[in-house]
Image (cartoon, rainbow, N blue to C red):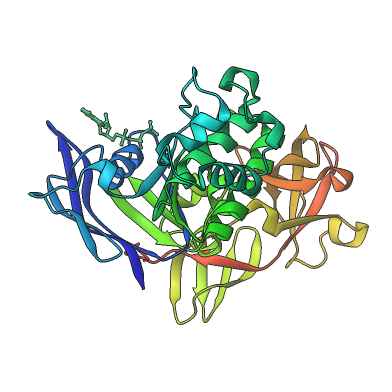
Amino acid sequence: MSFLRLESVTRRFGTVTALDGIDLDIPKGTRTAIVGPSGSGKSTLLNLVAGFDAPDSGRILLDGECLADGRRVVPAHRRAIGVVSQDGALFPHLDVEANIGFGLPRRAADRQTTITGLMDLVELDRSMLSRRPHQLSGGQQQRVALARALARKPRLMLLDEPFSALDAGLREAMRAAVVAVLEKAGVASLLVTHDQAEALSFADQVAVLREGRLVQYGQPRALYFAPADPVTAGFLGDAIILPATVTDGWADCPMGRVRTDTGGRRGAAEIMLRPEQIRLSPLPPAIAAGDRPEVCRARIEAVAFGGSLCTVSLALAGNDGVVPAGARVYRVKVLSVQAPLAGESVALHLEGVAHLFQPDRAVAV
Ligand SMILES: Nc1ncnc2c1ncn2[C@@H]1O[C@H](COP(=O)(O)OP(=O)(O)OP(=O)(O)O)[C@@H](O)[C@H]1O
């Protein structure tokens, strides 16, 4: 059942349409990530839900209550929506205790136990109770910000790039901690992030915005493996887009034959593979000599070391093993311990299924 609902929400700034008729249904207790290129309308959407701004038209409903409908607007402080921003926005002159307790009644008998309970929930040591924000690490500050937002028992939590100021290792740990806290508190959340991998791992569902429109909305796996169009495919991760001829659930493409995720189509089509679907193996001499024409061969053009994974650039070769002049170069990812060497000839194997783009590229919701 829908918990947060946006109906045809539009917001214009002069001649710019920041959000253009957005329809979105977010189920209770779930996590949603909003992604999209810079200027696609992510912050505008968050601001409208928070109540910092109002839509020109359309409606926003939370748990059945209308928050904004183009005429009436419920002010931000009456929405019971928590916000955690990029820098945490803690009050610098207040200690941890006062920051977390900021929205709690001063004379409440359970004030102290609520604050320490929240510190336990966000896994912040109680010895930090009297520290000021500048005496905390970035990760600790974000935990205080999260505890402060949770103190007001929000119905919905808005997370505006809350991990972006943290370094890679801490970022991942904080993300996992926030997921655990939100789950424990049973609070639905909306995360805006520029990090596609973060969105895919954080959320139950991801909404992709482009130029103020909702391009696709669905589960992370579905979006990653079955994006609505090549632009979305490339936005969510590295993608190899190939022309193909499809027949009854199979595609013949320049990299070989592979199953497709949708059957029932025939003829020319465009397919997508993720780079990790392409496996490389050494070319046995018999195949190198021209036997087994069904095996797709390639020459390794370059190998870029990247820690656990290498990015391997390869060009497809003909059955004679020769790479035609001007051949397109594809990039695939392989485990570094299995990486081939530049100049080597390899055989390609396609794993899993290829995504078949719809001819009209209808929005998949
Ligand atoms: N207050 C404003 N006045 C005028 N134009 C605005 C205002 N706020 C946003 N815009 C415009 O609306 C569009 C959407 O902006 P928004 O900040 O929502 O995008 P975004 O996806 O959050 O971008 P980023 O990833 O860079 O933060 C942009 O073209 C932006 O310039």
Q: Quadrant of the N terminus?
A: bottom left
Vertical order, 169 against 255 (above or below): above
Vertical order, 16 against 214 (above or below): above
Residue nearer the viewer, 62 or 345: 62
How far across and how far down the image is residue 290, in percent?
Answer: 81, 60
How far across and how far down the image is residue 203, in percent?
Answer: 52, 56
How far across and how far down the image is residue 208, in percent?
Answer: 40, 51
Residue nearer the viewer, 235 or 169: 169
Q: Residue at x 64, y 19 (%)?
A: 135
Q: Residue at x 66, y 68 (%)?
A: 352
Ligand 1 location (quadrant): top left
How far across and how far down the image is residue 263, in percent?
Answer: 49, 80
Can residue 212 be seen here? The reply is no
Q: Residue at x 52, y 82 (%)?
A: 248
Q: Residue at x 62, y 27 (%)?
A: 138
Can residue 146 be seen here? The reply is yes
